[in-house]
Image (cartoon, rainbow, N blue to C red):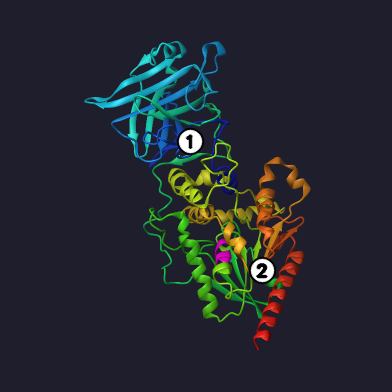
Amino acid sequence: MWAKMALKTFTLLIAVSLGCPGQSTPSGPIWNVLAFDAKGDGRDPSLADAALLSCRYDKQQDMLWFRVSLYGKPNPDTFGVNIVVDTGGDDASKMNWWGANKDFKFDKLVTAWVKRGASGYEGTIGVGDVAGVKAKNFNNLLQNNLQIRVEGDAIVIGVKRTDITDKMKMNLIAAVGSNEQWNDDIPNTRPVTVDLTAPRPARGLRELDLGRNNFQLPSDYKALADNQPPTIIKKGQGNEALILIPGVYSGKEVFDGFIARNQARYKFYLVTPPGLNGTPARPLPAETVSYGELTWTRRLERDVLELIKKEKLRKPVIVTHGFPGSLAALEIAVQHPDAVGGVIDVAVMPVQFFPSPKDPSFKTPAAPDERVAYVNESWAQKWFKYVTPETWESNNYRAEMFTSDLVRGEQVRQQVESAPLQVKIRYLTEFMAADQTSDFAKLNVPLLALMPGFNEKFFADPTNGFYKISFQGAWEPLAKNPQIQRMAIPDARALILDDQPKVADQAIAEFAGRVAKSDAASMSNRK
């Protein structure tokens, strides 16, 4: 699931057995991601800095391919790469690696310490064992047996599997630098395990298609013009105005039952973020625009403010169900407090902990600029730009997260996945880049967080612990502001309004009633 993968583990290190896919698409080969690495953790900032380690296996040719993506472009004329391998032999035949990952023991070393020559790359090229390494003869077993090339931001190394081992499973790390010195390991701790016999998993794929560009909509896509409003549906005959904003993980019917039950009480304005639930998306920003600009999210803010102005709404309550609406509503409440009466966040994951890439222990929170930079340079450019639809869906939320009714949950899951991948990625990366901690502290408008309480049986499954942290625990430090009220709804999952309609309706009614009463008192005092 992307919130779990991208927010809980920004320093993604996959230390489980993975295959290396050999399949290709019309746009090019598929690569399997083994590890991410933080920017700037190398010894010398002027040398190659590893970002992403991927592999693929050509079964027909029995060829292993490794791709080390870098921050910035590699120097195509001179560079150094090592694939450091533990083939599973006895410890007597191994030695410790000398880079950052010093605890890793290896018995085979693939080396490409090269400069460009008249007929291709030349230098120390080949495979060595521990005896060769100790003798400074790093390619004592095989020489000039590698395929070496530079592709964009990456260095690609091809080697026959049997030149390394007769086995199909191995542990390994990679290292980069110049043709004369080591600079950076990936991963920095523990190895990755590659199992070439492992079946392609149904969940947890890590596949990239470098022929894709998820930051561009299809050339024939009919986008919503910037001067056009999003899809807005008006319903209800009541006096209290509610602006309802579904999110990326809501499904198109998330508010239907709530609206049907409360037609007489509220006047509803259902604002669908462009691109979701079958609506046209706005044009995607240029790839050079930082995700920290929250381009689409802040355009949604303008849409809501324009709606309030056009309809002459007096202190409406904004009800969101996840991002981007939750981000937009908070910024409106902080920057335009006179425009809204309050905010209700239904099943919203607020600001998630993001470790500073500068802290090897990953315990220090990232500064807002660090968060934005890592999203821009790592997650966006190295991962989300190329991620395949199959990888996206295999890591996304399961039906049981939405509701205990698994048939209904699967329907919603399919609705969520029906949005274009480019749209889902844009909204998610803006959410990832947003650190609204300071906005929550400055908030001077009442906010009600309706949190899914799930139940003990659900949380008894260790794989579900993330939901408690993200839906509930993440609100704790923010609730120091007395304007923020939290309410966990027992036996409700993300579709709170459907799972526990009476409790949710009452909580919303009481909150909206307090907002209306406060506004009436304020108007009376002005008289």
- At 38% from the left and 34% from the top, the residue drawn is 48
* Helix, strand or loop at mark 2: loop
Amino acid type at image mark 1: Asn
Image spot of residue 482 (x, y percent): 69, 64
State the residue at coordinates (70%, 82%): 521
Q: Which residues make up the magenta segment?
A: 327-331
Asked if residue 122 can be seen in this view, the reply is yes
Q: Is residue 495 in sight in this rendering? A: no
- Mark 1: few, some, or many residues within 10 Å (few <14, many ≥20)? many
- Residue at coordinates 40% horizontally, 41% vertically from top-left? 210
Question: What secondary structure do most residues of the magenta stretch adopt?
Answer: helix
Q: For this view, does 95 lie left or right of residue 397?
A: left
Residue 184, percent from left and from top: 44, 31
Q: Nearer the viewer, residue 64 or 106?
A: 106
Neighbourhood count class around disc 2 (C-alpha, 10 Å): few under 14, some 14–19, many 20 upward: many
Q: Nearer the viewer, residue 35 or 265?
A: 35
Residue found farthest to the bottom:
527
| Residue 52 drawn in magenta | no
First in sequence, mark 2 or 1: give its number: 1
Label 1's element? strand
Instruction: Please tell me whether residue 175 is drawn above or below residue 233 in the rendered image.
Output: above
Give coordinates of residue 30: x percent, y percent. 44, 37
Q: Which disc, if any, is residue 446?
A: 2
Residue 522, labelled with which disc? none
Q: Residue furthest left?
A: 118
Q: Is residue 395 above or below residue 186?
A: below
**Residue type, numbered disc 2:** Pro
Tell me whether circle 2 and circle 1 mark residues in contact (CB < 8 Å).
no
Residue 348 image offset from top left, x and y in percent:
63, 58
Can you identify the residue that label 1 sits on?
32
- The image quadrant that residue 243 belongs to is bottom right
Cα–Cα gap, marks 2 and 1: 46 Å
